[in-house]
Amino acid sequence: MAALAVFCLTALGAILSNNKFKSVDHRVLANRDGPRISVASFFTGASVPPKLYGPIKELTSAENPPLYRDFLVSDYMGYFFSRALDKSGLDHFKL
């Protein structure tokens, strides 16, 4: 049986991928066969001039429209650090 790779993404990863990748709120039940792999990445979002982020355009179409609005990193970080811990970081940016 093939090994299972688990990518723990933040809400930002789910937004950029237009929900192709699930955020860490998504739970996975791994089988016992093969190694389990976790990949961490860090995103500072520092850009001058400010840059808009949103679903990657190549992942959207008329059949698969964007699920999230574009936003600045400062908007995302401001909401992320002000939200309740039991709230998702995704809902605030949904269209």
Image: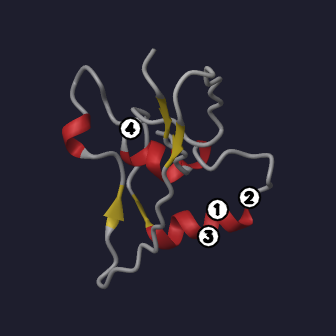
Q: On the rendered structure, is 15 left or right of 58?
A: right
Relative to residue 15, is residue 35 depicted above or below?
Answer: above
Task: Tell me how far mark 3 sits from mark 2, CA to CA.
Answer: 9 Å
For this orientation, the residue located farthest to the bottom is 48
The residue carrying mark 1 is 80
Near mark 4 (Cα within 10 A), the count class, few <14, some 14-19 or many ≥20, is many
Q: What colouring does the structure picture have? A: secondary structure
Task: Say if mark 2 contacts mark 1, CB within 8 Å.
Answer: yes
Name the image quarter holding the N terminus: top left
Callout 3 amino acid: Gly
> How many C-alpha atoms fall within 10 Å of the one at disc 2: few (<14), some, or many (≥20)?
few
**Gap in angstroms between the C-alphas marked 4 and 3:** 21 Å
Whichever of labels 4 and 2 marks the residue nearer the N terminus, that label is 4
Identify which amino acid the numbered label 2 is placed on. Answer: Arg
**In the image, farthest residue toward the top:** 1
Residue matched to label 2 = 83
Q: Tell me which numbered mark, 1 or 4, is placed earlier along the sequence.
A: 4
Task: Name the secondary structure under disc 1.
Answer: helix
Question: Which residue in the protein does label 4 denote?
Answer: 18
Q: CA distance from mark 4 to mark 2?
A: 21 Å
